Amino acid sequence: MTINPEKFADHIADLVEQIPADPAIQKAADLFVKALTSGGVIHAFGSGHSEAVAMEIAGRAGGLVPTNRLALRDIVLYGNAPRETLDRYDLERDPVVARTILDLAPVEREDLFVVISNSGVNGVVVELATLVKERGHDLVAITSQAHSGAVASRHPSGRKLTDLADVVLDNRAPYGDAVLPLPGGGATGAVSTITSALIAQLVVARTVRDLLEAGQAPPVYLSANVPGGDEHNLKLEALYEGRLRRGT
């Protein structure tokens, strides 16, 4: 038995065709527009490989300026936790960490949260989602319905990210994420980061379109590597002084 890498590309190509038709993408864009027109900021959180998707939403060229990326390391960067805390293998499973991350963030009432987790069951993710909803914020989730539905919650409440979000965006990754079976068991060819990034970009693009159609100038970043990019970006960031973080 061997694997066929081209089948992975074919699988991704099929998903790229299917995903834009998901009506949940427009529902998420509607929440983005609601937050932005109310003066809100969009906070994106993902741990592990899901952090790459949060980076698609917060602080990148072509993306929205009023965005923040929340991360596990915030407890060290902005809090008082020792550096060694980040070495804990079970850090993303500890619900207590979520409260610290949220309390350290510059959050206001109008803000929106996007939580990205392929499984949607770990303690930090579920606790963060719980706190976000308790504090009255809208919540968008990007997750794998197939994987999340096949595993038990690791949160004391027994809830999952999908139980808490106002809009659930399914990245269509299979249970275990990878799609090319290996001879000795397991699989290679992970799906979730590619499809979740596509979903994030579609939501942002529709948000920008809807703002334009409403006669509003969307606050979008230019690349810092083009002439005038820094000046453009700093001018827009100044409109949200004290509310944006661009940590590592």
Image (cartoon, rainbow, N blue to C red):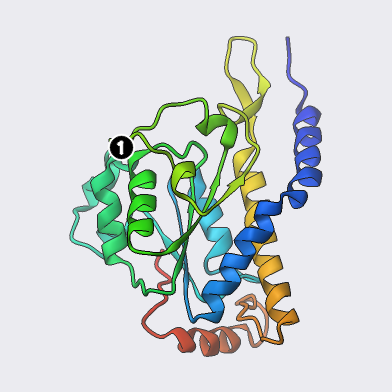
Above or below, 240 relative to 57 = below
Other residues around mark 1 within 10 Å, as few (<14) / some (14–19) / many (≥20): few
Quadrant location of residue 16?
top right
Quadrant location of residue 156?
top left
The spot of residue 6 in percent (x, y) is: 81, 30
The spot of residue 212 in percent (x, y) is: 72, 81
The spot of residue 176 in percent (x, y) is: 55, 27
- Write down the residue under mark 1: 157
Residue visible at 36% across and 71% down in the picture: 107
Q: For mark 1, give the secondary structure.
A: loop
The spot of residue 191 in percent (x, y) is: 64, 37
Q: Amino acid at mark 1?
A: Ser
The answer to whether residue 194 is left or right of residue 59 is right
Residue visible at 57% across and 89% down in the picture: 231
Closer to the camera, 62 or 207? 207
Above or below, 236 relative to 111 = below
The answer to whether residue 60 is left or right of residue 126 is right
Above or below, 20 relative to 3 = below
Residue visible at 50% across and 47% down in the picture: 50
How many dots with numbers? 1
Quarter of the image with the N terminus is top right
Residue visible at 58% across and 36% down in the picture: 145
Quarter of the image with the C terminus is bottom left
Closer to the camera, 248 or 162? 162
Closer to the camera, 231 or 121? 121
Closer to the camera, 12 or 116? 116
